[in-house]
Image (cartoon, rainbow, N blue to C red):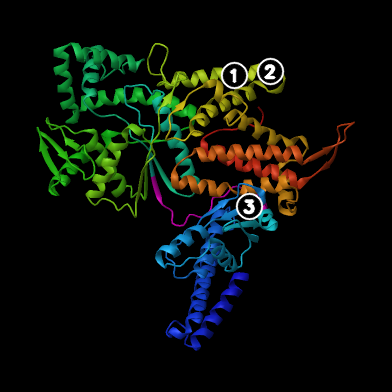
Amino acid sequence: AFQENEIKLLTAEIEHLKNFGCLGVSPSLEGLRDENAKLKYRLNFLQKSLQEERSKTGKSMININSCLQEIFGAAIQAAYPDLENPPLVVTPSQQPKFGDYQCNSAMGITQILLKTKEQKVSPREIAEKIAENIPANECIEKVEIAGPGFINVHLRKDFVSKQLSSLLMNGVQPPAVGKRKKVVVDFSSPNIAKEMHVGHLRSTIIGESMSRLFEFAGYDVLRLNHLGDWGTQFGMLIAHLQDKFPDYLTVSPPIGDLQAFYKESKRRFDTEEEFKKRAYQCVVLLQSKNPDFIKAWNLICDVSRKEFQKIYSCLDITLIERGESFYHDMMKDIVKEFEDKGFVQVDDGRKVVFVPGFPVPLTITKSDGGYTYDTSDLAALKHRLYEEKADILIYVVDSGQSVHLQTVFAAGQMMGWYDPKVTRIAHAAFGVVLGEDKKKFKTRSGDTVRLIDLLEEGLKRAMDKLKDKERDKVVLTAEELKAAQTSVAFGCIKYADLSHNRLNDYVFSFDKMLDDRGNTAAYLLYAFTRIRAIARLANIDEQMLRKAAREEVLILDHEKEWKLGKCILRFPEILQKILEDLLLHTLCDYLYELATTFTEFYDNCYCVEKDRQSGQIVKVNMWRLLLCEATATVMAKGFDILGIKPVQRM
């Protein structure tokens, strides 16, 4: 209502200026023209804000940083209407004495004015002018100019209290993202006939978490598992299958250990010339879609799928399988398309494509006429763009593939398949997993660590930790102990990965990840169960909390209440940052900050007051219990995005 009323007043004022012929026609009316520009911008800002407010359901969490950016964007535009793309820098303040947020745009504007207009204006003077033009809004209590030109922003307590109440009544709802975009996330991607090893851990965990984040933010997400399920290696596997299980067409072969089966076939391929020739013949027959060979191929793929699914079930991973074989029939057309556009060169029988800016060409056809990874990756890229109609494509693949993927993306752009200004294609690269010796993570015998062994070891160690703390004796039932074991084991493995910047290598250490001190899943899971227990121990049930959320005003008078309230509401801006840079460790850092901020609050503010002699509850400070509930609600959603399952008792 306030915005609608101001729009009417502004529209009337602009009409009044029009009647005086002050729409920038006469140079002698410079001041009035500036005033008109300011009013028009203010009007546009208010109309946009009103439109956005109406488009929201009223349940979405507000991104306070984005709101402040809009407000300061309007203020800067009103103060300096001639500036194109002025810098807009709004960040949370690091210290309470500097307010709650800071706008640090004045210094940048000083430089722009000096370079473009040769005007020497102090940052402080610019900051004062910006502050004078801040439009009416519901979130800022006051601003102060500090130092050379920092604008310190103090939020209104009633605004923060209202947002917390909305969170408690509506749950954690994502901010509105506008048009619902299609996101394709390519992750995990193990090879058929080979076991998943520790190297697949990062892609699987990071890809799952990214998918969950985009889904929560309201995007249409397609999670793809680009399996290595096609190629010359299947020739030797099928030939070996024919020898070992000649009746495989009628009796399902009992291949128990596919890894051993692969090694046997590889040894024969390397040492038996006759077997090698037959393996090549099998590849030809498979690629020509001979039904018997397709059946053999499916049998081998099915054994692998069952093994992969054990791991995906443990880690709660959801994927749609779409391996290299899916794109095989498209590859011929891909090669023709490159040829028709004149991009193909022949090099020693191979068909290659040089992409400007990349030294190594893509090989789209081998000298024997076969296709390559380059061909299948190009086919996959085009299919995702044209058939899936992806607006955003994310490849969660190790850093070692960076040059290859960038070349493939650049080739797609060269072909006109997509415009990077319209379609976002990102390589979410990640480093390797290291052992505690800082070398590539291996077993003692030097073999690659099998992922299933790693998960089983995690379960064992989690149970040992729970038993060390005697949780099995008094605290937990057998069922609760089992739930706590899987929550801690798999939660700690995921969190240890996600809490590190994915671009860096990280050291895998069960001792560190199971430590219940510091930034670990064990600490956060324990903190979460503690927070959830506060209301339960005060005999306050969910229904009573919901009623209180509707009726109680959250008082934020104590500095620790205020600090916690603001920290809770930073959740949407944290998620927005990750949607932009795809760095999930920011969420882990935030959850750890939230947990430690809660501990400060809990140590300083009594939620439940008890009689010191009898231990009886004498007073329940309901608004503080609501802060506990809001903290737990945000933590639970953070855990869900990370793929971690908390438990009520631990």
Looking at the image, is mark 3 or mark 2 earlier in the sequence? 3
**Is residue 179 located in the magenta-colored stretch of the structure?**
yes
Q: Which residue is mark 3?
A: 100
Q: Which residues are magenta?
A: 163-183
- Image point (67%, 29%), residue name: 649
| Residues marked 1 and 3 touching at CB (< 8 Å) | no
Q: Is residue 1 above or below residue 96?
A: below
Distance between the alpha carbons at the discs numbered 1 and 3: 43 Å
Of residues 648 and 22, the one drawn nearer to the viewer in this rendering? 22
Residue 388 at x, y percent in the picture: 33, 47
Indicate the secondary structure of the residue bearing disc 1: helix
Q: Which residue is mark 2?
A: 470
Distance between the alpha carbons at the discs numbered 3 and 2: 43 Å
| Residues marked 2 and 1 touching at CB (< 8 Å) | no
Can residue 1 be seen here? The reply is no
Mark 3 residue type: Asp
Residue 442 at x, y percent in the picture: 41, 17
| Residues marked 3 and 2 touching at CB (< 8 Å) | no
**Is residue 311 located in the magenta-colored stretch of the structure?**
no
Mark 1 residue type: Met
Mark 2 residue type: Glu
Residue 558 at x, y percent in the picture: 75, 48
Looking at the image, is mark 2 or mark 1 earlier in the sequence? 1
Residue 231 at x, y percent in the picture: 23, 28
Of residues 93 and 110, the one drawn nearer to the viewer in this rendering? 110
Q: Which residue is mark 1?
A: 463
Looking at the image, is mark 1 or mark 3 earlier in the sequence? 3
Q: Is residue 395 above or below residue 177?
A: above
